[in-house]
Structures are given as structure tokens and as C-alpha cells.
Image (cartoon, rainbow, N blue to C red):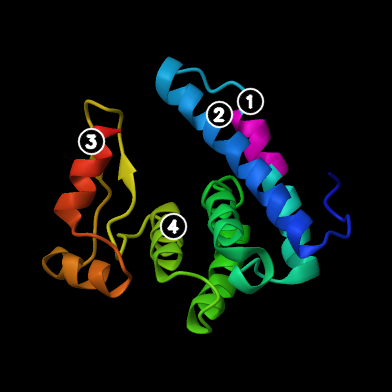
Amino acid sequence: MSPGAQLSSRDLAAELHRRATTDQAARQQLLNSGEAGDLLRIDAENTVWLKAVIAEHGWPGIALVGERGADDAWLLVQHADRDPAFQREALELLEAAVSSGDAPSRHLAYLTDRVLVAQGQPQLYGTQYTGDRETLRRQPVTNPERLDERRAAMGLDTAAESDHRMRAL
């Protein structure tokens, strides 16, 4: 589907889901085999497409694409790491969407941390990890003694629960 194509809300949600499913399959392949395969191409194509969607529709929030579609849009922007300027722009749009109730606050927590880590800064919510299964560790966090308070305010589980879940993957 071309980036500039006019899509109905339902078609947009379906395309977001198709792209998110492809994204997750490529990441699962990387976890299972260590082979990146088409991951970089998929991320690049999704980034170009999502930029066009945002230019045409604004942030694809719950009102436009439903809860699953909003989750899928967030996932695609999370994985647009090769375009940090786009992630920062999307973060601003996502902040407004969360403020108006059009996106969940957990999306904002994850993307905020992703952008901060990409800028070499400590994260706020402790959502970003580094390493492989054997060396997995949380990226540095600002004011770690208040981490669980910040996480709770964004609808996230505790840092300990998050660590447990990440290690179980």
C-alpha cells in the first residue's frame, strides 16, 4: 500500500495491524535464530509509511484507528530507531494524544524512554533494556529511587515486575 494512499479509518487500522504483525514476526525471527533478515527493510518501510499517515491524519490515536490500531502505530514508531528526528516529532504528537485521552499513557512512557536513550540520556520510566538474554539490563534511569512512582503514574507495572517479564522472554 503506497504511503500517500487515502485510507478509511478501518483500512488504516487494518494496514497498521498488518505492518505491526510483520514487524513482530521479524523480531521474533531475530530472537529465535539471531538472523535479522528483513528487519531493517521492514522498519524503514514502516517509518516512511507512518510518516505519510501522520502527515495526512495526525497521530493515529484511538478515535481514528481504535485501541489496537493505536497500539500498532505506537509499535511502529518505537521501531523507527533509524529516524530519531521522526521519533521526537511523533513523541510531541503522542503527548498531545495522551493529554486528550486518545492514546494510553504507557505509549508515552515507552516512547519518551526510547527517545531519551537514543539521545544518550537516562530514561524516566525504565522501559528500555540492552544486552542479550544472558546480559540483559535496564538502560540507566534518572532518579531510580522514584522509578516505581513514575511507572505507576503511567499505568506501568513495577520495575521488578518488568525485569521479571523481560527475562522471561
Give the Cα separation between the discs numbered 2 and 1: 7 Å
Give the Cα separation between the discs numbered 2 and 3: 20 Å
Q: Nearer the viewer, residue 57 or 147?
A: 57
Q: Nearer the viewer, residue 74 or 87?
A: 74
Q: Which residue is mark 4?
A: 119
Q: Position of residue 156 (x, y in %)?
A: 29, 63
Label 4 environment density (alpha carbons within 10 Å; few <14, some 14–19, many ≥20): few
What element does badge 3 sit on? Answer: helix
- Start and end of the magenta stretch? 39-45
Q: Which residue is mark 1?
A: 38
Q: Is residue 107 above or below residue 19?
A: below
Give the Cα separation between the discs numbered 3 and 1: 25 Å
Q: Left or right? Give the position of 1 relative to 138.
A: right
- For the residues bearing labels 2 and 1, Cβ distance under 8 angstroms: yes
Q: Which residue is mark 2?
A: 26
Give the Cα separation between the discs numbered 4 and 3: 25 Å
Q: Position of residue 150 (x, y in %)?
A: 24, 71
Q: Is residue 34 above or below residue 137?
A: above
* 3 or 1: tag closer to the N-terminus: 1
If the image is split into quadrants, where does the C terminus sit?
A: top left
Q: Which residue is mark 3?
A: 167
Instruction: Residue at 68%, 70% (x, y): give it.
Output: 64
What's under tag 3, amino acid-wise? Arg
- For the residues bearing labels 2 and 3, Cβ distance under 8 angstroms: no
* 4 or 1: tag closer to the N-terminus: 1
Instruction: Residue at 14%, 52% (x, y): give it.
Output: 160
- Which label sits in the foreground, 2 or 1? 2
The disc at residue 4 is none
Q: Is residue 44 magenta?
A: yes
| Residue 136 visible somewhere in the drawing | no
- Which label sits in the foreground, 4 or 3? 3
